[in-house]
Image (cartoon, grey):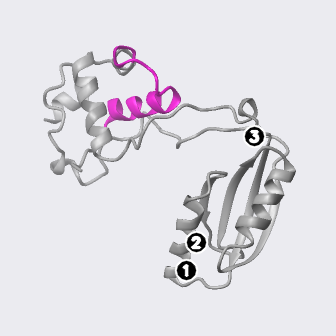
């Protein structure tokens, strides 16, 4: 993975792709104010550097028969690293679990679980989750509705390109870009 320093164009590309991963490279380049070939090079560099982990469709769970979403707070009997990893590996094998986050605090993990209905969730809870090794307790919270679902992170396109004091360390990753902002061109 090569290191990439994000400039305004990179942040714009990331923000636009995060909002619409199916956007064509031509449209993405137009929005970023550069031509298509350097835009594609930037996207590939952002992928290689790990800023872009993948692309997916935002599928409607209700349309596919998954009408229930539950957040399960899970407490384990042991928090030894080996036991935490075993639990995470087990959770990764359960398709109904869509997210797993380790927590600091009263519970060790919170799981986002989808199910067809409440009975489907209860079957999962009793046959898989509470039956799993090292699980001490589970507290379930049924989601009534989702009023906001925004994947990713907020991306400030206008934040500074280079942190103070690092100007002399700027990479030449995009020297081939056909269109540069005047600020980048004068810094080279």
Q: Is residue 163 left or right of residue 150?
A: left
What predominant SS class does the magenta segment belong to? Answer: helix
Residue positioned 31% across, 37% down in the render = 7
Total number of numbered labels?
Answer: 3
Picture quarter containing residue 178?
Answer: top left
Identify whether 168 is placed above or below 136. above
Residue positioned 76% across, 35% down in the render = 65
Q: Which residue is mark 2?
A: 87
Name the secondary structure under disc 3: loop
Of the numbered discs in the image, which one, if any, rests on residue 164?
A: none
Magenta stretch holds residue 106: no
Picture quarter containing residue 147?
Answer: top right
**x, y (%) of residue 57?**
54, 31
Query: Taking the image as drawn, is residue 14 in sight?
Result: yes
Q: Is residue 150 left or right of residue 153?
A: right
**x, y (%) of residue 81?**
50, 80
Q: Is residue 93 left or right of residue 170?
A: right
Q: Which residue is mark 1?
A: 83
Marks 2/3 in contact by CB < 8 Å: the verdict is no
**x, y (%) of residue 179?**
22, 19
Identify whether 188 is placed above or below 1. above
Identify whether 169 is placed above or below 156. below
Identify whether 53 is placed above or below 165. above
Name the secondary structure under disc 2: helix
Q: Earlier in the sequence, mark 2 or mark 3?
A: 3
Marks 2/1 in contact by CB < 8 Å: the verdict is yes
Q: Indicate the quadrant containing the C terminus: top left, top right, bottom left or bottom right.
A: top left
Find the magenta span and give its range.
6-27
């Amino acid at each position: 993975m090569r290191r990439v320093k994000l400039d305004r164009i990179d942040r714009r590309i990331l923000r636009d792709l995060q909002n619409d991963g199916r956007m064509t490279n031509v449209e993405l380049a137009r929005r970023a104010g550069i031509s298509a070939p350097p835009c594609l090079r930037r996207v590939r560099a952002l992928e290689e550097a790990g800023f872009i982990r993948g692309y997916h469709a935002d599928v409607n769970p209700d349309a596919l028969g998954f009408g229930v979403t539950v957040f399960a707070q899970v407490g384990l009997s042991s928090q030894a690293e080996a036991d935490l990893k075993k639990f995470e590996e087990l959770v990764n094998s359960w398709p109904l679990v869509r997210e797993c986050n380790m927590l600091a605090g009263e519970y060790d993990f919170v799981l986002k679980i989808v199910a067809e209905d409440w009975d489907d969730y209860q079957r999962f809870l009793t046959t898989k989750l509470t039956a799993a090794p090292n699980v001490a307790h589970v507290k379930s919270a049924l989601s009534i509705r989702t009023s906001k679902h925004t994947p990713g992170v907020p991306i400030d396109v206008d934040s500074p390109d280079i942190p103070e004091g690092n100007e002399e360390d700027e990479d030449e990753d995009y020297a081939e870009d056909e269109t540069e902002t005047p600020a980048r061109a004068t810094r080279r």
